Image (cartoon, grey):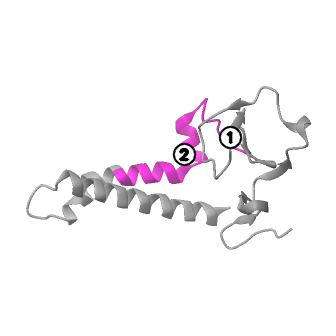
Amino acid sequence: MSRGTRNNYIPSREFHFMQLDEFEVPKEIKEFFPENAEETFLGNKRGAKKQYRYGKLHFLEYDDKFLVHMDKVDPRVDPIGHLVYDTPEVLAGLACAVFGAIDFSSIFNKNSKPSLTKRIISSLAWGYIGYCVTKEIKKLMR
């Protein structure tokens, strides 16, 4: 198996992508799955049918397998800590979106107060930029 690719993801069967810090478990091996794992909506599903959490373990369920990784912080216990340590790109995107709506909207209209539409467009653009840049930095730091 290849240890990595340019974007730090390993292609898996059926075009699901597996991060280097995850492992794949076939669904046939039922014994590994904790009985008390809870179905959750927290997290990026990345095409999975369902997702579960058991402590810091995060399970993504596909038709034929599970992808499993361990978060540094359980988002059900400490959502802010999870944003800081496990998904800083989301936190950076939100921060950039807020500052984009407040400060950078004046780029579009210097003579008068920016309209709500321009603030929303600015917020979305800066939020997306902040998310993407932070995600790339996170990949480089692995």
- Disc 1 vs disc 2: Cβ atoms closer than 8 Å? no
Label 2 residue SS: helix
Neighbour class for label 1 at 10 Å: few (<14), some, many (≥20)? some
Identify the residue at horizontal 32%, vertical 53% (top origin): 99
Secondary structure of the magenta portion, mostly? helix
Closest to the observer, 100 or 52: 52
Label 1 residue SS: strand
Residue at the spot of label 2: 84
Of marks 1 and 2, the one in the foreground: 1
Type of amino acid under label 1? Lys
Quadrant where the image shows the N terminus? bottom right
- From the viewer's perspective, tell me whether residue 12 is left or right of residue 84: right
Tell me where residue 43 sits by quadrant.
top right
Closest to the observer, 80 or 47: 47
Earlier residue among tags 1 and 2: 1
Type of amino acid under label 2? Val
What segment is highlighted magenta in the picture? 70-97
Identify the residue at horizontal 75%, vertical 65% (top origin): 10
Give yes or no for residue 128 being in the magenta stretch. no
Label 1, label 2: how far apart the Cα atoms are: 24 Å
Say if 94 sits above or below 12 in the image: above
- From the viewer's perspective, tell me whether residue 12 is left or right of residue 123: right
Task: Point out residue 12 in the picture as x, y percentages from the top left corner.
Answer: 77, 62
- From the viewer's perspective, tell me whether residue 135 is left or right of residue 108: right
Neighbour class for label 2 at 10 Å: few (<14), some, many (≥20)? some
Quadrant where the image shows the C terminus? bottom right
Task: Point out residue 21 in the picture as x, y percentages from the top left corner.
Answer: 75, 55
Task: Point out residue 80 in the picture as x, y percentages from the top left corner.
Answer: 52, 37
Residue at the spot of label 1: 50
Identify the residue at horizontal 36%, vertical 53% (top origin): 97
